[in-house]
Amino acid sequence: MIRQDEATDLDVAKQILRYFYRNPQAADTVEGVARWRLLEEMIQSNLETVMKAMAWLVSQGLLVKETRPASAPLFRLNTAETKKIERLLAEGTRARKRRKQGTKG
């Protein structure tokens, strides 16, 4: 088992390692890793998160996915589901308000 140094951010260390693991021929300076490589890893992670969320929104009928030849799919709001969308958005707002009130008092 690898022990973590208390001064080391394990999440950042894993991001760096993941980059070098995916790109075994890569070599860079600390500054280069900080500026470009970690940004690339964050973008890749964010893309995966967004793709999953958008797939879920399509599966729920809240977004419509349009495919076109030789082009990336486009997504748009399913205006026929406005009430359902408003309910979902309101749920998130109410939950945030409850959390804020819980931490204040």
Image: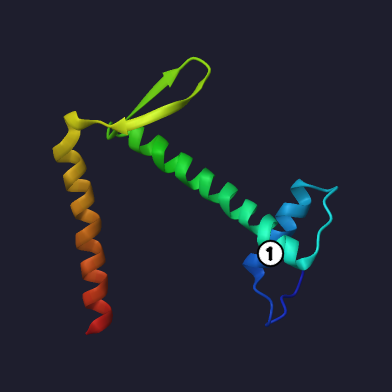
Secondary structure beneath disc 1? helix
Report the front residue among 46 and 36: 36
Is 47 on the left or on the right of 80, as rendered? right
Q: In the rendered image, which quarter contains the N terminus? A: bottom right
Is residue 23 depicted above or below 78 in this figure?
Answer: below
In the rendered view of the protein, which quadrant contains the C terminus? bottom left
> Looking at the picture, how far across and down is residue 16, in whole percent?
71, 60
Left or right, 38 with reference to 70: right
Q: Residue lying at the far left in this picture: please name it.
A: 83
Residue at (52% x, 44% y) in the render: 47
Q: Residue 83 in the image: x percent, y percent?
A: 14, 39
- Front in this rendered view, residue 18 or 67: 67
Task: Check disc 1 and report the residue beneath it.
Answer: 34
Residue 96 at what x, y percent from top left?
Answer: 26, 65
- In the displayed structure, 4 sits above or below 41; it is below
Mark 1 surroundings: few (<14), some (14-19) or many (≥20) residues within 10 A? some
